[in-house]
Amino acid sequence: MEERILEILKTLVAMKSVSCSTVEVEPAEWFAGFFKTLPYFEKHPEDTGLYEIPGDPYGRKIPYAFLKGKKTDTVLLSGHFDVVSTEEYGKAEPWAYEVGTSKLEEMLRKMPLDDVAKADLESGEWIWGRGVADMKGGLAIHAALFEQYAKQALDGTLEGSIMFMPVPDEESYSAGMRNGVQILKQFKEKYGLNYKLLIDPEPTADKGELQIMSLGTVGKVMPAIIVQGKKGHMGHCYQGFSALGILAEIYLKTNGSLEFSEVYGDEASPPPTWGNMRDMKKVYDVSIPHRGYGYFTALNFGMTPEEILNKLKKISTEAFEHQVEKLNGEYQQFKTMSKAEIMDKIYYEPYVLSFNELCDVARAKGEAEFEQFYKKAYDEIIAKVNTGESNYPSATIDMMEAVLDYSGISVPVIVIGFAPPYYPPTHSDQVKGKEGFGTKAFEKVRELSEKEYGQKVDFENFFTGISDLSYGCITSPFDYVKYSANTPLWGDDYNMDFAAIEDVAIPGVIYGPIGRNYHQYIERVNRESLLKVVPGVTKALIEYMWTL
C-alpha cells in the first residue's frame, strides 16, 4: 500500500488546485474517474458521481462514492483537495507541486530554514511540497484504503459500509462540505445508513514524540460592525461625533478579551481577533469620519451566535455611552477656554441595532419596496464576490451600509451583523445517540498506534484551526433563523442546511499524518506517518467503528 499512497499523492499534488479557483475542478474529476475504475462501481454505477455545487462561480464539484457492506453502519472518509497558493516559495515555486523529484529539496537548501526544518530536510524522513500535509497526504491514504475496501465490497465480504467524499474549498468558505451534507442525507435516506464516524485527515500536530488527535472542532463566528456618528467640520469638531472613537472602544473591549473565551477541561478557546477596522470615507476631506466599520473572528466551544450578539450589543452600548460622556467632558472644559462655544452640553442617545433590527426599521418604510431594494443590492454585491472583486466580510459591510442608507437613520447608531463563513462548534462525544464515540475512537487509535507502531498519541477536545468537521453534526444547537436573519449575505450564494446537518449527525474526528508548517514553503509530511502508521491505524479504526 505504501507505493500506492505515494503514487496517489504525487498525482494529487501535481494538480494546482488553489482554493477559490476553477482548478479545483481538476481533482474532483480525477476522483470521479478513479472511482469509475473500481470494478465495484461497474456493478453499482448509481453509487458514485459528481455533485455540482449549485450556483458556484468556479463550477466546482464534489466527487463521492459509496461502498455498501453487510451492515448499514457507515464510516465517512473525507478531506479537502484545495490548497493555498505558493507565492512564498519564491524561486522554488515552479517545483512546489512536485513530489518525488529532488528539485524542490535542492532549492529549499538554498533558502532560509529554521533549525527544525534543516534537520528534517537532511533526515530524508519528510516529504515536501504544497498540500502534501494539508491535506492531500491524508486524502491519498483514504483513497488507497477505499480502493482495498472496494474489492471486499465486490465479493460481499465488506462488514460495514463506507462513504468517501473528498471536497473543495475548505481553505476559504467550505462550500464543499456545506453542500456535501446533501449527498450524505440522500444516501442515508436511500439505504437507511447509520453514520458512525467522520474521519477528516487534516495533518495532525506533533508535540515532541506525541501525535495529536482532535475529537472536535472550534466554532467560528465573524461579527461585522458599522458605527455611524455625526458628520462635522474638523474646525468645529464638537458639532460632530466621530464614529472612530466608538469603534476603537469596541475594539479595545473585544480584541483579545477573555470574556469571549470558553474553557473545556484544560483547553480554552482563543479570544477574539479583529481582521479589519477603518473609517468609511471615500475621499480625503476635513470632515469628521461619521462612519467606520470592522469585523473580527470569535472562536468558541459552545457559545451561540445569539449569545455573542448579545454580548456585543452590551459592549457597544457601553462604548457609545462612554464616548458621549468623554466628548461632553472635553467640551465642558473647552468651553472655559473659548467664548465661541455656546452649546449647553453634548448628548446622543445610545442606539444599537442588530442587522435584523435595522432591516425592520427599513422595512417599515414599505415592505414590498424594501424587498425589491434588498434583492437588487444583494445581487449586485454578491456579483462582486463571485468575480473576485470582493469577499464575504467586505461584501457584508457593503450590504449593511446599503440597508443603513436605505433606512434613512441619520442619528448616531451602531449596527451589528454576521459575515460568512460560519462554522458551528462540534464535539464527537456529544452527538445525540452516539455519545462518547469520539473518546472510543481515540482510545482505539492510541492503543493501536502505540502497540503496533510505537507512535504515542494524545487528544485535544477542539481543533482550533477551524475545519470541515463543523458541518457533520451540531452539538451546540442555536436559533438558526435568528442567525440567518442577522447575516446580510445569507441567501442563494451563502447558506447551509442546518436541518440536514442535524439529520446526518456524524461524530467527527481529525486524524491524519503528522505534518509541519502548513501554508508555508517548508510544508512537509512525515514519511513513516503517511505511508505506514496512519494507514494501518485508520484501517483498524474504520473496522472498529462498525462494531459500535
Image (spheres, rainbow, N blue to C red):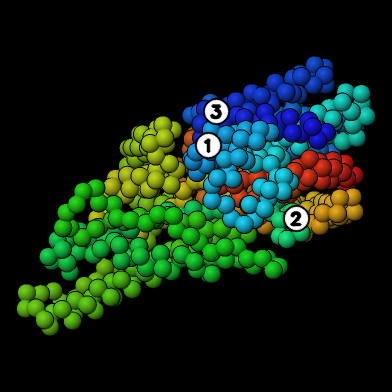
Q: Look at 54% across and 56% down and name the residue there.
A: 305
Q: Give the side of residue 188 with respect to residue 414, left or right.
A: right
* Image height of 260 relative to 372, above or below: below
Residue under label 2: 211
Give percent across and percent down for residue 114: 59, 55
User: In front here: 235 or 502?
Assistant: 235
Element under disc 1: helix
> Which amino acid type is marked by label 2?
Gln
Element under disc 3: helix
Residue under label 1: 93
Judged by depth in the image, the label closer to the viewer, 2 or 1, is 1
> Which amino acid type is marked by label 1?
Glu
The numbered disc on residue 23 is: 3
* Image height of 343 relative to 299, above or below: below
| Residue 33 visible here | yes
Q: Look at 30% across and 71% down and name the residue there.
A: 323
User: In front here: 267 or 397?
Assistant: 267
Query: Are there few (<14), some (14-19), or many (20+) residues within 10 Å of tag 2?
Result: many
Give percent across and percent down for residue 229: 26, 60
Residues marked 1 and 3 touching at CB (< 8 Å): no
